[in-house]
Image (cartoon, helix red, strand yellow):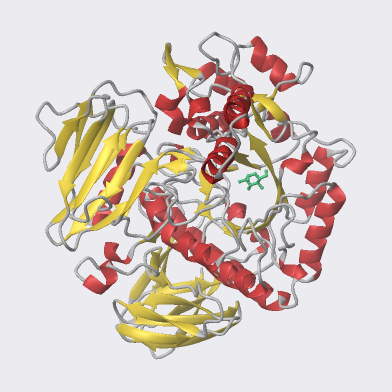
Amino acid sequence: MIRKYTFGTPLPTDAVVQSLPAESGELPYFETRTGEDGSVTFSIALHPEEVLFGLGQMVRGIDKRGHRYESWNSDVFNHTEERPSLYGSHNLLVFFSPERLMGVYLDDPGKIVWDLGYGDHDRAYITSESGGLDLYLIEEDTLVGIARAFRELTGRSYIPPRWAFGYIQSRWGYASEQEIRTVVSEHRERHIPLDAVCQDIDYMTDFKNFTWKQDAFPDLAGFQREMKEDHIRLVPIIDAGIKVEEGYAPYDTGKAGDFFCRKADGSDFVAAVWPGRCCFPDFLREDARRWFGDLYRPLLEAGIEGFWNDMNEPALFYSDEGVADAFAAADRIRSGGVDYETAWWLKDVFSGIANSPEDYRRFYHELDGKTVRHDRVHNLYGAGMTRATAEGFRRFRPGERLLLFSRSSFIGAHRNGGIWQGDNFSWWSHLKMALQMLPNLNLCGFLFTGCDLGGFGCNVTEDLLERFLQLGVFTPLMRNHSALHTREQEIYRFGSWETMRDTVTVRYALLPYLYSEFMKAALGNGMYFRPLAFDYPEDRRAVHTQDQILLGGDCMIAPVYEQNAAGRYVYLPEDMLMVRFRSAGDYDLIPLEKGDHWIDLKISEFPLFVKKDRAVLLCAGGESSETLDDTRFTALGWIGKETVYELYRDDGKTADPDPAGGITRIALAPGKELKQDVLC
Ligand code: GLC
């Protein structure tokens, strides 16, 4: 059951697809307090054992209790434990304890502060800065029921084409066709499976969106055709800012249509991103979205089938006003000399030029005919860009699935695209953070997601990349991406490339199965990744487990995330079959009973746990998703009774697939063998 409570004057966000009447009574369970500044705070006592799931893209554990977070989409490069927010705002929180089960969703595009047992360990305080919001209270009998009800409220998750489940290689710095050809041939020659290469800002002329460096990429259509013959898709990046430059068509047409965000005096708001000074499309306006979506058309016509949208919090490196203010601040102390305090203050003044709260207050949007200051709707910007792109896709390629993933997001954007987990580092702690974020992202509707495998910033080590890939085998988006000037991170750069290749072969052998689990989750408003509590709510150990997650209907993953570990402890909430993979054709099958187990895992090994009486399907694998045989499988399962696996298959490219259409029922017979051949 979902009940809606309205506070102040909410703004339309496009997050919710069900229209519910607002309740007239008071919000139960919470104390509600309105501040003098117009903010509203909902507070509630927490039970001693209470676990808090949700908030999607955030640092720290699967259980969000014990810290303070903010919904404020941020371009942040350093995902340390105290970061209050990352790139997306996903305002769903689920309270779960033996005494209580409920979800609260705040549909509010402005800043929200979530003090979840930080100020007071036994109380949660949720503050909407603006005080204008719809709050949805979701009460169901199970955690799975809450997730489903929330998805029914907010709409079905985005479904990418099937090729997007292949391995994707990316790096900031691929600057020419030739460089990309080399990346592809290095993979193909070594039989490292590969489906796509992302193109970062280097393909553009002066980092200008929708341009293509003519000398380095002379024939876009021809190059993408050549790649496609080798089953490789090109996936270019598009940023939010449009460079201020007369004669540059996106700027000229944006200006002619008046589609950019404006300052109070009516002039365009300008701030710098990669191309220098930029204007920012007002994605909250339907006509501006249409104009922006149209800009993708030439690339689509050249055959491009996937994009990643970036810098759409929006990231603002600096504005003229911000720089002038910083110089003025420096001038104020110049004559008095500098001590350590003023020196630190000065440093903060200059580093605070980027993404400054003042800049986010300098510009305005038009929302349903009303002028709204940006900070009031800040968290909608990236979702608006995703929406503009997806609406363009629907106009130009109706009926087709295209790949789209974004950095910034808001609930609602999960219907239009996936997201990646942002600019992580090549740190072991970030491997664990990625794992912990996944189930909360799924709870909030973002099923198509994954982290930069190997880590984006800093220099990766060979063993860290291997362990990242072992997680990536299971994430819907499996992309190796790294930053300019960091150690080169393609698999073939390392002495142990064969081990890494073998890891990727497991992804391809599992791909039809993982795709099937993803599709069933997406089409059934379920979750592909879940916290253990969702299947084992009565099991206190499972409920509080922070480093293992459920995958699809029948599996659990527990990756190694520490350097030099010889294995790890794993808690099994029921009897399971461990498949310890080394490659698609080389694995151990070990039945294990419910309880604690130490699992030996050499650097080349990683486990998948399959519930008893269930099975996973392995195909023969291949080097691209298009060449896999999904009619012959080896089923791996510890099967003690008749069981059926429902395999979902489709053409992988038609939009709006039929949930029932693609199911084949595969009967698995009980027996001593842990492997069975299956034809379907
Ligand atoms: C941002 C993106 C990153 C990209 C870089 C250059 O930092 O998050 O993925 O490589 O910009 O475009």
Residue 593 place in picture, x, y as percent: 32, 86
Determine whether, in the image, residue 367 is placed left or right of residue 215.
Answer: left
Query: Which sits in the foreground, 42 or 200?
Result: 42
- In which quadrant of this rendering is ligand 1 seen? top right
Examine the rendering and report whether any part of residue 482 can be seen. yes
Query: Which sits in the foreground, 293 or 423?
Result: 423
Q: Is residue 327 above or below residue 191?
A: above
Q: Is residue 148 above or below residue 399?
A: below
Report which quarter residue 385 is drawn in: top right
Q: Residue furthest bottom?
A: 672
Residue 669 place in picture, x, y as percent: 38, 81
Residue under the point 63% across and 75% down: 463
Residue 641 place in picture, x, y as percent: 30, 81
Q: Residue furthest right?
A: 215
Q: Is residue 192 above or below residue 613?
A: above
Number of dots carrying numbers: 0
Q: Residue furthest left?
A: 25
Determine whether, in the image, residue 85 is placed left or right of residue 391.
Answer: left
Residue under the point 14% across and 62% down: 98
Residue under the point 27% across and 29% down: 39
Residue 146 place in picture, x, y as percent: 25, 50
Q: Quadrant of the N terminus?
A: top left
Examine the rendering and report whether any part of residue 400 can be seen. no
Determine whether, in the image, residue 161 is placed left or right of residue 115.
Answer: right
Residue under the point 55% across and 15% down: 262
Query: Which sits in the foreground, 379 or 234?
Result: 379
